Each structure stands twice: as C-alpha cells, then as structure tokens.
Amino acid sequence: MVWLAFWLLLALHQCCRATPRVVLLVVPDLTCADLTTLPLRSSIEEFSSQGALGWMVCRAASNVPRSLLTAEGTDRLTSLLLSLGAGTRAVAPPDSFLAVYPPVPLGTGGSTLNVALLRRCYALNRRLEYPVDIGLLGTLVHRSGGATAAIADADNGFRANAALLVAMDAEGHVDFAGPRLFCAKGNLLAPEGAEADVEKMLSAFNQLPIKTRLTVISFFDLQRATEEATACLPAMAALYRQEALGRLTKLMQGIVEWLRGEPDVTLWCCAPGPGTYVTTDERLAPVLLMGKGIPKKGTIFAPSTRWDGLGLNSDLLPTIAQQLNLPNVPRSVVGRTWKFKEKGSVSLQSFCAYFRQLVTHAELQNLYGGLPILQLFCILGGVVCWRRRMLPPSVFGLMIGLLPALLLVLPALFTFNALIAGIALGISLMVIAAAAEWMSRTQRDAVAVLRTAAAVFVGCVVVDLLTGSHLMRQAWMSYSIMEGARFFGIGNEYMGALFGAALLLLPWLINEKGNWRLAVIIYFGIVFVTVWPQWGAKVGAIPTGVGAFGLALFAAIRQRISWKEFAWLCAFALLLFGGVAFVDLHFHGANESHLARALKGEGGGSLIVVVLRKLRMEEFLLFHSPWTAVLLGSLIAIGYFHRVQNANLGVVERAMWLGFYGGVVCALLFNDAGVPAAALLAQQGLGLALCEGAKQTDRLSEGIS
C-alpha cells in the first residue's frame, strides 16, 4: 500500500505540475530609436530591470530571385517571419500571393493557410541548397499535445497570413486564430485607415485556454505608420509613430500585468527583422525576454555567435523549444539554444549604445574589409616601379605586407567613424611608404623590416586567439556580423594573412637559427591554435596549413618533394582532422564548432551537403569576387619576379616559395571562401618579392626590359 501510495503521489505531482508556456509578441518595424521614445521607454526599462535584452541578426534565405526581395534588396517581412517558425533561413511567396489568398477559418476557432499559398511556400523552399521545415515550431508544439494561438491587429488578408507564419504547423494550422487575427478598428485619421484595438487583443489573449502553450501576438501598427510615412509630412509621420508606440505600450503593459500571475510563462518581445526602409547593411532587431528562467538585468548569450547580447533569428526556435520542453527537435535546425547571463548593470542606454557599436563596426567592415582595390593598386604600383624605377618597389611591398596588421590593430586603438577611420588608415599607409622610401635611400634592409613586422603580426594573432579573439572581434577585415557568416575564431582572410606572414619567417627559423625542429614546433603550434574549436575554429586551416608549412618544411629539410612526402602530409592532415573532430564532438553549446555540427548532420544537412554547398559558394566567389583579380595579379607578379631571380635563391628560399604556392592551392580547394584566403596568402609573398627587388633594382630592371 505504501508503494502504491508513492506512485499515486508521483502521478498526482506530474498532473498538477504547471505546463511551461511561451508568449511571443512580434512587432514589425520596431527599431532602436523606438526603444528610447516615450511612452514605450518605460515598458522597455521594465524589461531591462526584470528580464534580459539582446539583439538578433535577422536573415532570410539568400541567393533568391530579386522578385522575392524588397525594392531595396532586403529580406521581406514574410520571409523573416517564416524563418522564425522554421528555425532556418526561409523564403516566403511574393506579397501578392499572401494578399490574394487570405487565411481559411476552421470550425474549431482556428485558421489555416490557403492550400495554394502553402504549396507555394514548400515549392520555393525546396529550391534552396539546404532543408527547410516549414511550420516546424507549431508542429513541435502539436506533437507535444499543446495548442497554438495567433492574435493580430490585421486589417487585410496579407497581414492575417503574416500573423500565422510563426505559430503554424507543417500543414498551416493554428488552433486558435480566426477572428483573433483581425483585432483592428477603423479610423480614418490613422495610417491606412486602421489602428490596433488593444482592448480587443488583450481580451482575446485572456480568453485563451490553459492548454495554449505557444501564443504569437503580432502588432502591425508600427508597420502601418512606417508605410504611411512615405506619403505624408514629417510632422504627421512622427505623430502616427508616436500614437502607434502608445498603443504598443498599452498592449505590453497588459501582457506584463497578466504575466505576474503566471510563474510558468516566458514572455518574448522582438522584431522579426530591421525596419522596412533600412539599408541592406543593417540586419539587427531587438529581442526582450522576461518570466520563467530569465534572470533579472540579464543579457542573452548565443553559442551561435559567442557574443554577449547578440544572437541569430534562427536561434529563436531551439530556445523556445527548450523553454517549452519540446522533444525531438530536428537536426535541420540551424540555430542553437540561447543561454542567459545575469549582468546586473544592463541599462537601456548601454543596450542602444551596443546597437550603434555593432552597426558602426559593420559599416567599417564594408568600407575597409580587406580593400581589394587598394591591393590591386599596390600590385600595379609595385610592378611599374620595379620596371620604371620611379619609386623603390619596397614602398608597395611594405604596404602590402603590413596592411592586414593595420586592419587588425587600428580598430583596437581608437573608436572610429567611417571618415576618421579612412583618414587614420591613409595616414598609416603614407607613413609606411615614407619609411620604405627612406630605407631605400639609406640602404636599409626592407626585407628584415618586413619579416620583423610579420613575426609581430603572427604573435599578435596567435595570442589574440588564445585570449578570446578581442582583436578579431573589432578588426575591419574579420567577422561579418550583419551577413552572419562568422562570429568567432579566425576567418578566411586572416587565416591567409597569418599563414603567409608565418612563411616569411622560414629563412630566419632555419638559416639563422639552424634548428629545423624549432620551425616544425612553431608551424604546428600556429596550425593547432588556428584549428582548435575553442580558439581559431577554422577547419580549412588543416589542409591549408599542411599544404603551406608541410611542403615548405619538407623541401627545406629533406631538399626534395616526392610522392612519399605527399603521402606523409596527407596522412598527417587526416590524423589531425580526425583528432580535432573527435575532440569537437565532445563539446556542446558554445564550445562546439561548425565541424561537429556538420559531422552530426545538424544545422542544415549532412557533411556531404555542407561540402557541396561550400563548393558552390567557392565557385561563385571565384567568378564574382574582386579578390580573384588580386589573387591572379599576385601570382603572375610573383611568378615573373621568381623567374627573374631564380638563380639567386637558396634551398630554404625555394622551399618558402613552394610553401606559398602549396598554401594558395590548398586554400582554394579546401575552404568555403578560399579566394580571399589564397589572395591574402599570396599578397604576403608578393610583399616579400617587392622588398627583395629593391636590392636588385638595376639588374632586374635590365632583365625585365
């Protein structure tokens, strides 16, 4: 009887235990400026004191036809909403389809997408290079026995369809929708003749049954105000937005008041993407959370980015799935579950300042990220000066060699805007050019200066990767925050520059030190730090590093390269890859790299699918990127200069150049964006060739003529 009583009490506890629920308030066109505007500011400050704040990088499917984008070339609202519900970057049918086919009401009080519209969604997303599970969030909720609800202030079929895209399941069903989607009232003085009926929305929300585990509330008043702003005077546009923010504040206050009596509910408030008329470079949207499991005065931490306060829109689905205890989340979900950190000092001012910092950083990346046009100019200038003897070739050689270091160090020294950054970079390059010209007149060794700078650069990059990548986070030629390409570790650009600078040190490590074992240890350490998941997290560095350093070391030590040496290098690369993969598979969350997710088939397909997608990306860059011209120009110039001075090269120097060629080939073959990596690796070699040419200007000029 005691045993029976124990199991009865356990079953009773399970039945009486509160079921977790999530309320998601989606506010299209909510911007950073709105957060600090009265009367919304008071509600946002309550979120900052009672919950967590963060920013989302919002992306829909890329490489889609222009007709599926906005007139400005940005992602459409419906594609971003569909991406939130699918857990990956998706694309929605044209807005005209959503306007023509309104939602179909169900007899149970729910709604479903029109069959033709749903088929169109599936047809468009099948054409993408990765799997997209339409309506995954709603499907997971339904599989767990819960219900979904959608409430909106829609005034037409288009917005009603948009309100269903996050909460619907794979068949387009939402359990509680119907008239709840049209909580708007007519007002001839309001934008588009309609405004949100907040009382009706709150009444519909309060009447939802307890089994509703996911409730998505869409507030379109701000979007209507944004659309109307293009056709009215600025004063009226500001008034429309102010009134819309007032209604949003009232809605948020009503939901927060209800939340105080529901300890098992998590409240989300977010924009599905940036504003309607922002530039293509801005992709950030605010996200605010409070309730169950959310620390006070906290911030989000996304393993996808490893940045405090910055996540991806694809992370929303796995995070909500964990909060609702939803089982069997498919591996096709790209995002990772957020963690929440209690900061204790998160304010609205610092939150908005962080946004401006991220936007400014992205703007500087777009303007000064690698500067391939400047690199081409330096290639042409170096060749002309070598031939015509107008300036010492070392002027352009040092500029080419030191440019990656400038793009790494300058952002850490000052806080720049676009103009000041350009001036600082220009002054730095002029100082380098003046120093190179002075060294030429005073018979100083420019090669020694270049190799010294390369050693300092290699040391800075390795130490930075070991200590948290603080320089990499700020560098102009580094991560792509808005594009969502890389947020941690080392990117292709700096991998190429790092390996190229390290190869410049080979004559010092072997000739002057006389100890090839030291060179092996140093080069292995560079590759290891670049590859390790917690530091560089760059899998492509294995074949690139082995191809560059391995060939150079074999040629310098054994003075030959045969099939046997190639077999040893391939075996070592496979062994290193297997070891890194084995260790990476035992990491989870923030420590897990893209390699482990690809091996487990997570985040958008199996390893083979990911490799094929990367190859298509490499093919696109090869024929469309300006870095291709930089790579070809560098290789042609290096090949010609190498041919001219081939007789004067020693064994170690020949081995070094073999390492450059091997590294370029491996970077192109084994990296997803190998063109810039190969170009920057070759640029370091070209800088050395130009600096060495300053010593032999007369003889080489005669030979070229």
Image (cartoon, helix red, strand yellow):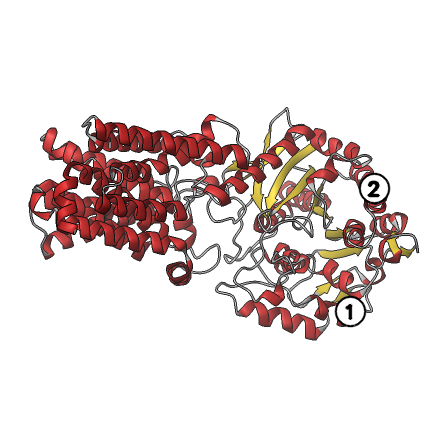
Nearest to the observer: residue 490 or residue 573: 490
Position of 402 compared to 10: left or right? left
Q: Nearer the viewer, mark 2 or mark 1?
A: 2
Instruction: Where is residue 507? Give x, y as percent.
Output: 14, 36
Q: Quick one: label 2, few (<14), some, or many (20+) residues within 10 Å?
A: some
Q: Is residue 338 visible?
A: no
Would you name the residue on which mark 1 appears?
Answer: 102
Position of 523 compared to 175: left or right? left
Residue at horizontal 69%, vertical 33%? Answer: 51
Would you place residue 589 above or below residue 453 in this image?
below
Looking at the picture, which amino acid does disc 2 mark?
Gln
Q: Cβ–Cβ below 8 Å for labels 2 and 1?
A: no
Residue at horizontal 51%, vertical 40%? Answer: 364
The label shown at residue 242 is 2
Instruction: Where is residue 156? Give x, y as percent.
Output: 82, 63
Position of 657 compared to 282: left or right? left
As helix, strand or loop, the secondary structure at mark 2 comes to helix
